Amino acid sequence: MSRGSIVGVRRTRSVDRREAVLESAWLHRLDAPSWESPAGVLSVESGQPLDQSADGDVVLVMTKPGGGAALEHAAGIGRGGARVYVLAEQGWTPTGTPLEHVPRVLVRRVAEVPATGLVAGTAAVLWFGTGPTWRLVLTVRQRDALRQLFLRCFWHRAVDEAWSSGGAFQFRPASERPFDVPEVTGDASVRLTSSSDGSVADERATHTLLNHAPPTDLSCRRLWTAPSGGQKGPLLTMLQAGCSVTWDKVGLPDASTDGRKGRLLLPGDEARLRVELSPEQASALLEVLDGPAAWSFQAGLELGAFADQPVEFWLPGADGAMELSREVRLDMPTVQPEELREVLEAAPAQWSPPPPLALGVVYAWEVLPPTVPNGAQDDPLVGQWRNVDRDWDKRLAVVRGALETAGGLRASIGKTFKRLMSSIMGFERDETKLQEELAALAAEQPSGHGPEGAEDLLGRLGKLEEEIGKLHVDLEQAEKKAREDEERARQQEAWASSVSAARGELPSKKAELEAARDEQGAVGVQFDEVEAALAEEQDKKKKKDLRARKHKLTDQRNRAAQRVRGLEQEIEALEVRVAEPFVYKPRPTPPSKKKDKGRRFVPSAPKKTIKAIPDDALPSVGVLKKHKGKRYVVIEDWSELDIGEAEARRLGAKLVAKEGT
């Protein structure tokens, strides 16, 4: 599977249609050779003068719009002194035509002139056709029929008339005919027939030209009919019957011939002029209808056969001919498959019909991946795991703070108690290990590991909390012991100093006691002597002196006794000090002034969080959404497809792309 962001994919499909076959079509060869006009009785008008048989005293000329050739010939004969009788359609006027200044011209106008023609002397000619103008030189029989037709229309159907009188033609209502002209018979070689008459061909005709759709029962060897998008059925039927269907802009009216006989049927709104051809005329017509044609109706046309040819095709139902297209691009509707995996291979269920004249088709379409519905929210499982992750982050923050506090306490102990450097280094190593574990845990989220992995992570976090708590306890105990040792040493030093001082004072105190005792004994002897003398002395004065001395000695004796007792007490105290053993007295810990300072880190109980772990893991790729009771695993990159499908199956979800892709 490819990699990259999941977005709409634009796809194409190329189809080579060179082997495609058209059931039927008009084929126009743009380089086809041009048809050539025959010479003789049927030819394209070239301006050649009529032969001398056209001279005479009277010229009959019929003119339809555009009948300039007939008027030129009539004017030429009229200028020679002949009278010119003109049969024209209503609205026509000689002004601006070759007859404008010709004398002896009588114009009578009718509703419709059947054809453009001329009868002069023994000659008669018809002109007809669209595009090129054709000239048909009539036989004697045809001439006579045309003359009778002319006279019948001229005298019986005229609406108005005008004479040339050296000035402008002034039309007035047609005058009464001088005589009656009989109708042209039904077997005349030139006659009028119904405007709806389309029977130009008979069963003997091998070549037929029709300027309208052919009848379904027409049978001939070659049919000339104008190309169009219709008449597919009848033309196919004729092809299957062996008829060649062609067309070119020869400009002839409806016609048919077998080379010996033939017929022309000129167009008309009120009536059509029907001309039965002579063998010579029929042969000339066959020469045209058996010649080359640029258009042909064909069946089973393989496109590739015409890939490099200058051709056009007019297809059934089309408005015109078109060339082949090398390649056509067809934009197809957007496709959105149900499954995400189908995006890279999805194609329209149906293909648009290719243009029939396209040698190649490139289908182009866009495949949109199935996306999460608009308004989808996080699945409740996402919220449950989010709570687990949030609790995880909070506990990590507490652990991080506790570890920082432990580091500060370790540094403080190291500065205060230099002799603990060895222990401090051990604490530092423990702290480093704990920091590494904290960093490893901080790089994880329980939601990314599923229920079992989350329990393992939370177990590691609980163990880390316990170890940091133990580190705090060990640091506090180390600090406490260091302080106790320091206090013990201070007290022991004070005790030793006190014993040493007492031991040093005892000799002097004892000597001082001996001296005090001697002094006490001497005072006692003197007191006894004075007391004895006082008992014997009778002399009042001396007795008085003795009493005064006794009183003085009494004071001295008391002071000496007091001195001895004091020294004895001092010596006893010194001896007690010397004999007293060392006893350590712990110093009471003062209460903390700050609420949290010095508080030992107590790890949080992980069991509460473990109970909150969901039973299902989040998808290992993408996100889990929910909309109207349905779950969706939403991914953004094609590289996640395989895993995403497995995760979607596990969670009972549909795998989709994010909204807007």
Image (tube, rainbow, N blue to C red):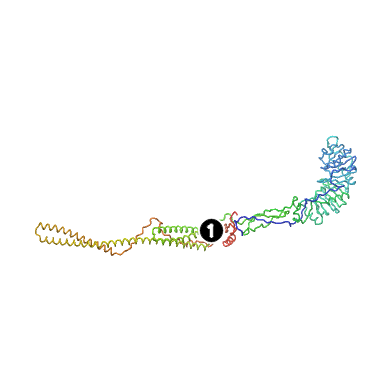
Tell me if I can see residue 474 in this picture.
no
Tell me if I can see residue 617 in this picture.
yes
Q: Position of residue 194 (x, y in %)?
A: 83, 47
Question: In screen coordinates, is 130 left or right of 433?
Answer: right
Q: Position of residue 659 (x, y in %)?
A: 59, 55
- Quadrant of the image occupied by residue 135: top right
Looking at the rendered image, the quarter that the C terminus falls into is bottom right
Tell me if mark 1 has few (under 14), some (14-19) or many (20+) residues whose alpha carbon lies within 10 angstroms of its own: some
Q: Is residue 372 above or below residue 125?
A: below
- Quadrant of the image occupied by residue 55: top right
Label 1 is placed on what type of residue? Val
- Of residues 439 and 529, the one drawn nearer to the viewer in this rendering: 529
Q: Position of residue 580 (x, y in %)?
A: 29, 64
> How many dots with numbers?
1
Question: In screen coordinates, is 460 left or right of 122?
Answer: left
Question: In screen coordinates, is 458 left or right of 318?
Answer: left
- What secondary structure is marked by label 1? helix
- Of residues 43 and 115, the one drawn nearer to the viewer in this rendering: 43
Q: Position of residue 620 (x, y in %)?
A: 55, 60
Looking at the rendered image, the quarter that the N terminus falls into is bottom right
Q: Which residue is tagged 1? A: 382
- Quadrant of the image occupied by residue 48: top right
